């Protein structure tokens, strides 16, 4: 029996990078015998954080299929780091047709059928993604927020809640009061991140300086472009653009507060907290599971109140994010 780990070689600069690094770290620490499926494709940063490049996804799916087809044998275990594997049905068809019994597992941190998701408008994807979940023996979700979408469904028994690995001690922290950005918004600029709220918030707080990540370069959505331009025209907005890795963390270390509205687990706000930001998060999605109530808001008025309190009293009320490992997921999947 052989253990396999499949990591999409599609893009970098998002949660997938942190998940991948964390898995490598814990596999090494646990001395697990796991074979990584490697890809010949060059890792790239897709424009504007887009994950919908059909050419890239097509090539990746074919390569996953070909590599697993030649390497996997009966009773092997395959853990997919990103559940969104377009060739999964074909892979399973091949293994079943050649009488190979395989155990499948996947990490889920996004789904088109969850309200306000990146792919929400592509309604056909709901059936496609539920088919992927149906093929899995187990699906790991990082929060109760995601698990609740499946609690009354037949596939609900496949869902296991296990927070993904996060290692704040690896991120340099700055809690000096001398910072040039009051509030950082560390997300891509897309509708699923609720940018309308940010426009109302920033316009109502002219005394607070906001750092805006993201870009609308090569964007075709004219309404989204209009909204972005409205934001960057405001005198209290610093346009940061797309930053990844250390460049992103450098911006966060220059900021006092991080704001977030919607996450399934949230690597961006955790990285910001580890860098020295105080969280101001909406009292919805995954946030109430991980963050004390004093940092959560219910409406625009509450958000303004918390921001002013934390900005003007910084670094009072600073909290370090909790540390998590992938050990439980790895032991659960590869150990059973």
Image (cartoon, rainbow, N blue to C red):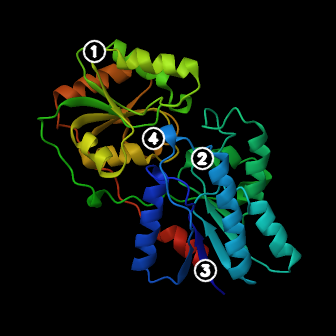
Query: How far, Cα to Cα, is label 3 from label 1?
Result: 54 Å
> Circle 2 sits on which residue?
110
As rendered, which of 285 and 79 lies closer to the eye? 79
The mark found on residue 235 in the picture is 1
Q: Secondary structure at mark 2?
A: loop
Q: Are marks 4 and 1 in contact (CB under 8 Å)?
A: no
| Residue tagged 4 | 287
First of labels 4, 1 by sequence position: 1
| Label 3 with label 1: CB-CB less than 8 Å | no
Task: Give left or right: position of 304 versus 129.
Answer: left
Mark 4 vs mark 2: which is more N-terminal? 2
Q: Is residue 197 visible?
A: yes
User: Within 10 angstroms of label 1, few (less than 14), some, or many (20 or more) residues?
Assistant: few
| Residue with the most extreme right position | 97
Q: Nearer the viewer, mark 4 or mark 2?
A: 2
Q: Nearer the viewer, mark 2 or mark 1?
A: 1
Picture coordinates of residue 287, whole percent (x, y): 45, 40
Q: Is residue 249 above or below residue 225?
A: below
């Amino acid at each position: 029996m052989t253990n396999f780990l499949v990591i999409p070689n599609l893009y970098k600069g998002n949660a997938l990078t942190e998940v991948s690094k964390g898995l490598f770290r814990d596999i090494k620490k646990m001395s697990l015998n796991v074979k990584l499926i490697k890809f010949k494709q060059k890792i790239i940063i897709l424009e504007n954080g887009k994950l919908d490049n059909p050419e890239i996804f097509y090539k990746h799916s074919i390569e996953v299929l070909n590599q697993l087809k030649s390497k996997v044998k009966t009773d092997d275990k395959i853990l997919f780091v990103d559940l969104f594997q377009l060739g999964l049905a074909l892979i399973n068809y091949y293994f079943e047709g050649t009488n190979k019994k395989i155990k499948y597992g996947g990490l889920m941190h996004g789904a088109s059928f969850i309200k306000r998701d990146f792919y929400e408008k592509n309604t056909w994807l709901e059936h496609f993604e539920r088919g992927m979940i149906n093929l899995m023996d187990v699906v790991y979700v990082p929060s109760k927020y995601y698990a609740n979408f499946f609690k009354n469904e037949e596939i609900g028994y496949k869902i296991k809640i296990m927070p993904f690995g996060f290692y704040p001690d690896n991120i340099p922290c700055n809690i000096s009061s001398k910072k040039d950005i009051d509030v950082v918004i560390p997300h891509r600029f897309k509708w699923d991140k609720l940018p309308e709220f940010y426009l109302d918030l920033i316009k109502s707080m002219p005394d607070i300086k906001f750092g805006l990540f993201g870009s609308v370069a090569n964007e075709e959505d004219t309404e989204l472009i209009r909204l972005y331009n409205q934001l960057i025209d405001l005198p209290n907005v610093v346009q940061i653009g797309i930053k990844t890795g250390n460049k992103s963390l450098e911006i966060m270390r220059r900021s006092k507060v991080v704001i977030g509205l919607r996450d399934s687990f949230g690597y961006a706000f955790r990285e910001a907290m580890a860098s020295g930001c105080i969280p101001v998060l909406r009292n919805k999605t995954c946030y109430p599971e991980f963050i004390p109530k004093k940092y959560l808001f219910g409406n625009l008025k509450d958000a303004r109140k918390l921001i002013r309190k934390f900005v003007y009293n910084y670094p009072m009320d600073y909290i370090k994010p909790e540390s998590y490992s992938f050990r439980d997921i790895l032991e659960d999947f590869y150990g059973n």
